[in-house]
């Protein structure tokens, strides 16, 4: 493709578009001399996108904005996910795009192991009891007690940066780790065993915990469906810190209601925010966090580091961007 050229640094304008992150505030501390502005809503972005040569955005992006973004040459995504960006549309327009892959790998992996611990140690129940001023007595039924992670098997679907980091954390708890990745020949890091995605159903019966850390793409959409739940042990726990649509949500709800698996800890769902009428809110064996796995106090600065590096590469006329995918 023929890429759009960026103007000189003193004529460059960056738009930061996010409802919560303080991107412009952190960017100003770098004293780059580059003009920037910030929008907090989708309507604001739609109204002002024509002013930007560079856009730093994630959930607000709409591919139809390309028609209005006549000056736009580069998008530095604020998130690691890439499914919201049409490679075909952006490529045809000559707009380069890079993801924020890696900026939150530690945070997401730590969140995932936190969810595993929360379920194993029954922390949601403890919080509910605290709110009710209820002191729970010791549990006689062995299968209903809190449990240890040592010796348990964790299947990690997606052995990129986040999955690999999660495997290291799991090994610190003496867990057995099975990694599922597109190309097992490239190695599985700390995993005890690595298999291709085609063998997922074969390893699911071994799992005490299944953690999803994979990207959303045509091969992973609805990857965890009714067949996958049927292959899992009734004592297994699903942890999703990937994307909501990696899991077939109706199948998940049915699995939770029927007891096909023991629990699910979800950081992402099909529709976000999760609609008030969703059955997931009220299922006692579902633990929900609001797509916050990647949040960290260092997030803005990590993204800005990527943005500035890619601007330098573009300024030098380089074709290879860090995390570039368009």
Image (spheres, rainbow, N blue to C red):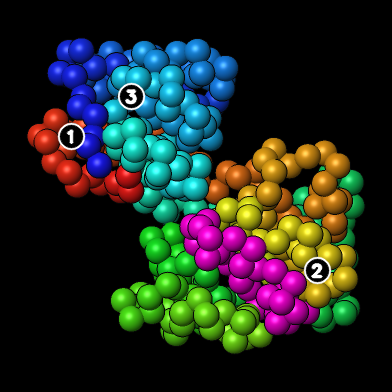
- Residue bearing mark 3: 72
Residue 255: which numbered mark, if any?
2
Is 277 placed above or below 252 here? above
Measure how far apart labels 3 and 2 are at the Cα level: 45 Å
- Circles 1 and 3, Cβ within 8 Å, touching? The answer is no
Q: What residue is shown at x 36% (from left), y 13% (from top)?
A: 51
- In front of the other: label 3 or label 2? 3
x%, y% of residue 95?
A: 31, 34
**Front-most of residues 187 and 106:** 187
In the displayed structure image, the side of residue 286 where residue 100 appears, left or right: left
Which residues lie in the magenta part? 208-235
Q: Residues within 10 Å of mark 1 (few under 14, many from 20)?
A: some
Q: Residue at x 50, y 76 (%)?
A: 197
| Displayed quadrant of residue 116 | bottom right
Write the residue at 41% across / 38% down: 89
Name the secondary structure under disc 1: helix
The crowd level at tag 2 (other Cα within 10 Å; few <14, some 14-19, many 20+) is many
Asked if labels 2 and 3 touch by Cβ distance under 8 angstroms, the answer is no
Camera-nearest residue between 234 and 8: 8
Question: Residue 17: in sight, yes or no?
Answer: yes
Q: Earlier in the sequence, mark 3 or mark 2?
A: 3
| Residue 214 within the magenta-colored segment of the rendering | yes
Question: Relative to residue 194, is residue 146 depicted above or below?
Answer: above
Q: Which residue is mark 1?
A: 314
Q: CA distance from mark 1 to mark 2?
A: 49 Å
Q: Earlier in the sequence, mark 1 or mark 2?
A: 2
Could you tell me which secondary element the residue under label 2 belongs to?
Answer: helix
Query: Marks 1/3: CA distance?
Result: 13 Å
Disc nearer the start of the sequence (1/3): 3
Circles 1, 2 touching at the beta carbon (< 8 Å): no
């Amino acid at each position: 493709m023929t890429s759009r050229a960026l103007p000189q640094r003193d004529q460059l304008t960056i738009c930061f578009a996010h409802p919560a992150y303080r991107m412009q505030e952190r960017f100003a501390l770098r004293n780059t001399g580059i003009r920037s502005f910030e929008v907090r809503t989708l309507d604001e972005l739609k109204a002002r996108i024509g002013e930007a040569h560079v856009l730093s955005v994630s959930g607000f992006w709409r591919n139809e904005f390309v028609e209005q973004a006549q000056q736009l040459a580069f998008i530095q995504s604020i998130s690691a996910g890439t499914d919201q960006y049409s490679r075909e549309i952006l490529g045809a327009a000559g707009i380069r795009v890079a993801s924020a892959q890696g900026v939150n790998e530690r945070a997401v992996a730590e969140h995932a192991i936190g969810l595993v611990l929360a379920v194993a140690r029954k922390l949601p129940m403890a919080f509910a009891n605290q709110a009710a001023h209820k002191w729970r007595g010791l549990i006689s039924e062995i299968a209903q007690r809190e449990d240890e992670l040592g010796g348990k098997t964790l299947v990690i679907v997606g052995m990129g940066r986040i999955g690999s980091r999660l495997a290291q954390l799991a090994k610190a708890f003496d867990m057995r780790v099975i990694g599922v990745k597109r190309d097992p020949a490239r190695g599985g890091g700390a995993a005890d065993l690595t298999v291709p995605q085609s063998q997922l159903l074969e390893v699911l019966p071994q799992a005490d915990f299944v953690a999803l850390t994979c990207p959303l793409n045509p091969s992973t959409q609805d990857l965890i469906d009714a067949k996958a739940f049927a292959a899992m042990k009734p004592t297994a726990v699903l942890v999703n810190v990937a994307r909501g649509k990696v899991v077939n949500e109706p199948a998940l709800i049915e699995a939770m209601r029927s007891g096909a698996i023991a629990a699910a800890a979800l950081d992402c769902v099909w529709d976000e925010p999760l609609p008030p009428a969703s059955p997931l809110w009220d299922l006692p064996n579902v633990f929900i966090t609001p797509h916050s796995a990647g949040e960290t106090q260092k997030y803005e600065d990590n993204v800005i580091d990527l943005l500035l590096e890619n601007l330098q590469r573009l300024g030098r006329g380089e074709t290879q961007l860090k995390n570039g995918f368009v």
